[in-house]
Amino acid sequence: MKSALRIACSRANLQQVRDFVRNYLNARQLSEKAVNQVVLAVDEVVANFIIHANGEDETQFLDLKLDFDDHDLNVEIADNGDTIFQPGPHKDPDMRAYIQEGRKGGMGMTLVTRLMDRVEFFTRGNHTVCHLSKHLA
C-alpha cells in the first residue's frame, strides 16, 4: 500500500512528516522500535533536504512516498528544488575526534545508514531523490 505527502521546505513541517510516517507504519502493526527507527531516519533525511539542499526556502517542496510490500518498506524523498543535493560517499566519522573537538552535527547520515538497510541518493531529471529501504518482519 502506497501513501504520499508533499510539504514546503520549512522545519515547521518536520512534525507533520514524523506523524505521517508514524501513522502509516502503526497501521501495519509493526514494533514500536521499528517504527521509531524509520521515523528518525526519514526525519533526518527530510531535515537535510530542507536545510542543506533548499536553504529552508518555503517556495520549494519535497515529496515523500511510502510503500510497504511483503515486509519491505520503501521510502522515497524527492526534492523539487533547482539544485542537486548529492551527499558524498558516506564514511563513519571518527567518534574520538568528534568528542575531542566538541563537534556538534554531522552525525545524521551515519545514523540513517545504521537504521536503514539501504540508503541511496540519485538524480531524476534536475531533482535529487533519496531512497531508503528496510525489511520489517
Image (tube, rainbow, N blue to C red):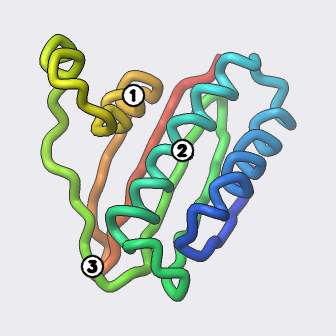
**Of the image marks 1 and 3, the number of the one nearer the N terminus:** 3
Quadrant assignment for the C terminus: top right
Query: Does residue 128 sit above or below 45 in this rendering?
Result: below
Q: Which residue is mark 3?
A: 83
**Of the image marks 1 and 2, the number of the one nearer the N terminus:** 2
**Image quadrant assignment for residue 16:** bottom right
As measured in the structure, the alpha-carbon distance from the residue carrying label 1 to the one carrying label 2 is: 11 Å
Q: Three-letter amino acid code at disc 3?
A: Thr
Query: Does residue 54 sit above or below 59 in this rendering?
Result: above
Element under disc 2? helix
Q: Which residue is mark 2?
A: 42
Residue at horizontal 38 percent and vertical 73 percent from the top:
55
Residue at horizontal 59 percent and vertical 76 percent from the top:
8
Q: Which residue is mark 1?
A: 111
Residue at horizontal 33 percent and vertical 38 percent from the top:
105
Left or right: 53 with respect to 88?
right
